Image (cartoon, grey):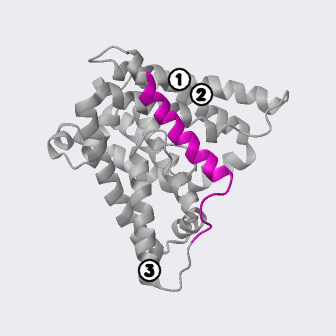
């Protein structure tokens, strides 16, 4: 079971980084392995040893999911946008009860949770609106490779932090910086001049982001999960598909939404106790 869950969770996590708007951190929370994976990202070797088998296959699944789904997810979003988007929305909605359960393991919900919830919600929705209205940059020039290397490094450090944060999409951050298309082409063409600073930056960002999240969770678990819940709810905004109407695509999309919710509930029941 550990091997299977590791492969499934890792594949979903890796694939989520291909699509702007999808948050890998959200899926980790929904699947109930968020803190376990963050401990590994933060290089906590005690936890890595404890969950070694799961984390090994999670890593394999992540790489496979990212590389294998570069074309597949783009294909489904282009051909079946409504159904694909509503499926992911269903997964997120179906996972919210698990997030609340994780948040209230040690403390009960109280009115003070509303402020961090709305702060998390506002953060993700604001990023979405800024990108929607074209506030972000259009890209970077490659005339000076040293400057280009440093910029890509910094961009991916930020994106790496986002890859750990529920509700925030690492791919979305790259879109915001105007380098998403260039990076996707670099992956497809194995352009190591771009991939080298990208990988280094992402690793640094993931480690820093994981350490920060774990530090906050240990001290303010209920408040942090309140923010996370708001960010997860906010992540629904960029996923809402265009073209919703009384047509067959919407009908099949609603079926996909329900299926996504069932998948989240099914996988969520097989979380930390099996890891």
Snapshot quadrant of residue 125 = top right
Q: Mark 3 Cα within 10 Å, few/some/many (few <14, many 20+)?
A: few
Dot in front, 2 or 3: 3
Residue 266 visible, this angle = yes
- Residue placed farthest to the right in the image? 246
Q: Which residues are magenta?
A: 114-139
Whole-percent x and y of residue 16?
51, 46
Whole-percent x and y of residue 207?
29, 53
**Circle 2 residue:** 90
Whole-percent x and y of residue 128?
60, 46
Snapshot quadrant of residue 225 = top left
**x 56%, y 79%: residue:** 141
Q: CA distance from mark 1 to mark 2?
A: 6 Å
Q: Nearer the viewer, residue 131 or 238?
A: 131
**Circle 1 residue:** 94
Q: Is residue 251 left or right of residue 270?
A: right
User: Answer yes or no: do the residues labelled 1 and 2 have beta carbons within 8 Å?
Assistant: yes
Q: Nearer the viewer, residue 152 or 128?
A: 128
User: What quarter of the picture does the C terminus occupy?
Assistant: top left
Q: Is residue 208 above or below residue 94?
A: below
Q: Mark 2 Cα within 10 Å, few/some/many (few <14, many 20+)?
A: many
Q: Is residue 184 left or right of residue 213?
A: right
Q: CA distance from mark 2 to mark 3?
A: 42 Å
User: What quarter of the picture does the N terminus occupy?
Assistant: top left
Is 138 colored magenta in this rendering? Answer: yes
**x 71%, y 39%: residue:** 241
Q: Is residue 101 left or right of residue 207?
A: right
Whole-percent x and y of residue 190?
49, 71
**Circle 3 residue:** 147
Residue 54 visible, this angle = no
């Amino acid at each position: 079971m550990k091997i299977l869950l590791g492969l499934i969770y890792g594949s979903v996590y890796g694939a989520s980084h291909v699509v702007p708007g999808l948050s890998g951190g959200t899926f980790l929370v929904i699947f109930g392995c968020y803190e376990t994976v963050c401990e590994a990202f933060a290089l906590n070797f005690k936890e890595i040893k404890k969950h070694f088998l799961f984390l090994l296959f999670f890593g394999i699944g992540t790489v496979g999911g990212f590389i294998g789904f570069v074309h597949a997810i783009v294909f489904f979003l282009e051909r079946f946008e409504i159904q694909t988007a509503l499926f992911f929305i269903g997964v997120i909605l179906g996972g919210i009860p698990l997030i609340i359960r994780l948040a209230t393991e040690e403390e009960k919900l109280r009115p003070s949770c509303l402020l961090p919830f709305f702060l998390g919600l506002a953060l993700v929705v604001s990023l979405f609106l800024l990108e929607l209205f074209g506030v972000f940059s259009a890209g970077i020039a490659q005339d000076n490779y040293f400057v280009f290397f440093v910029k890509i490094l910094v961009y991916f450090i930020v994106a790496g932090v986002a890859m750990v944060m529920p509700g925030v999409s690492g791919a979305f951050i790259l879109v915001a910086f105007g380098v998403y298309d260039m990076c996707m082409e670099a992956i497809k063409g194995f352009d190591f001049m771009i991939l080298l600073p990208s990988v280094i930056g992402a690793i640094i960002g993931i480690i820093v982001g994981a350490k920060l999240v774990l530090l906050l969770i240990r001290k303010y678990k209920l408040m942090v999960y309140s923010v996370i819940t708001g960010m997860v709810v906010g992540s629904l905004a960029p996923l809402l598909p265009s073209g919703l109407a009384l047509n067959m695509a919407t009908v099949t999309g609603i079926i996909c939404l329900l299926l996504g919710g069932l998948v989240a509930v099914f996988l969520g029941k097989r979380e930390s106790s099996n890891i």
